[in-house]
Image (cartoon, helix red, strand yellow):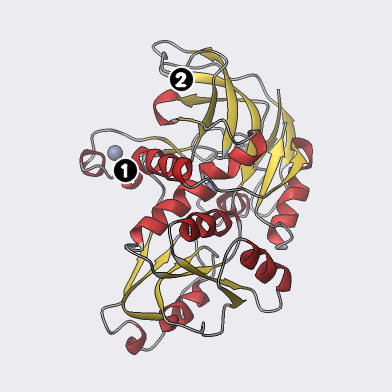
Amino acid sequence: MRAMTVAGAGQPLRAAELPQPQPGPREVLVQVLACGVCRTDLHIIDGELPPRQSGMVPGHEVVGRVVAAGPGATRFALGTRIGIPWLGGSCGHCAYCGAQQENLCDAPVFTGYDRPGGFAEYTVADERYCFALPERYDDAHAAPLLCAGLIGYRAYRLSGVRGPMRLGLYGFGAAAHIIAQLAVAQGQQVYAFVRRGDARGERFARQLGAVWAGPSDTRPPAELDAALIFAPVGALVPPALRATRKGGVVVCAGIHMSDIPSFPYALLWGERTLRSVANLTRADGEAFFEAIARHPVDTHVQTWPLAQANEAIAALRAGRVDGAAVLLP
Ligand SMILES: [Zn+2]
Ligand SMILES: [Zn+2]
């Protein structure tokens, strides 16, 4: 089968011909229909996350069809369209797994990092960590739900959202464009922060219902109740704290971030909370799919053929993608 593989830190992905994987116990063989490109894939490709195996197939926003089942895999009928997310497995017996915090598992298995992902024609996945997908989304439009959507949703929930509130989104990419729509539908006021000079990003955010959009180094017209930082830029933490009210929460939602510069304690004072969000639990996924069943969101995608994965990655790096980048095998 054709696949795109990690070639080494900072190198473009390399096209490869790999043997079709075989599903093991509780695994399904999935024919990939679409796979989103996530910021985390860039961190893996660039070596900003510790490299696992060389020649790894990245991609953890996989939409595919079940074409074979391994021993004991009975959850999905052959032909079912499913989604494979970043959390591909957890140990089930560490303290975190025992406390409904499998996102923090001591021995996790991540899709497209510890095990092959979706930048390929086929992949295998542990069926227990996959999701059934709503039919209203076609393959390409469903892909970004699987990481941008559901890890974005975890960040949104952990911002302490209750009642109508003013929510800041820093970095208006794949995750923010989904969470903005959901938040607006749930009665929140969304303030979108983009790179200075990114008029297109500001326009895109307003189209999706943001009440205000502007450069990330400016103060919004009103104090925020919470801010989610989706951009992997530590320098955004002090301005986000500055824009957030006493008792408010600032959530760093990415897996990797550049260093956070030092800042005066006064920015944190007033019982502001600064926290990160790591990975996802299966319960987050179920809750997210329930939420978008009640408040459907329109994902915006730009697609590339699998063989042009490096072009998709370049467009994502340059901020040239409105919404999410998706590869089609
Ligand atoms: Zn565990
Ligand atoms: Zn991701």
Q: CA distance from mark 1 to mark 2?
A: 20 Å
Q: Which residue is mark 2?
A: 27
| Percent coordinates x, y for residue 144 in the rendering | 58, 45
| Percent coordinates x, y for residue 59 in the rendering | 59, 40
* Mark 1 and mark 2 residues within 8 Å of each other at the beta carbon: no
| Dot 2 amino acid type | Glu
Q: Is 34 placed above or below 199 here?
A: above
- Quadrant assignment, res 159: bottom left
**Residue at (27, 33) in percent of width and height:** 92
Determine if residue 104 is in view: yes
Q: Which residue is mark 1?
A: 105
Please rate how many residues cluster around mark 2, counting C-alpha atoms within 10 Å: few if below 14, some from 14 to 19, many from 20: many
Tell me the SS state at disc 2: strand
The answer to whether mark 1 is within 8 Å of ligand 1 is yes
Q: Of label 1 and label 2, which has the lower sequence position?
A: 2
In which quadrant of the rendered image does the N terminus lie? Answer: top right
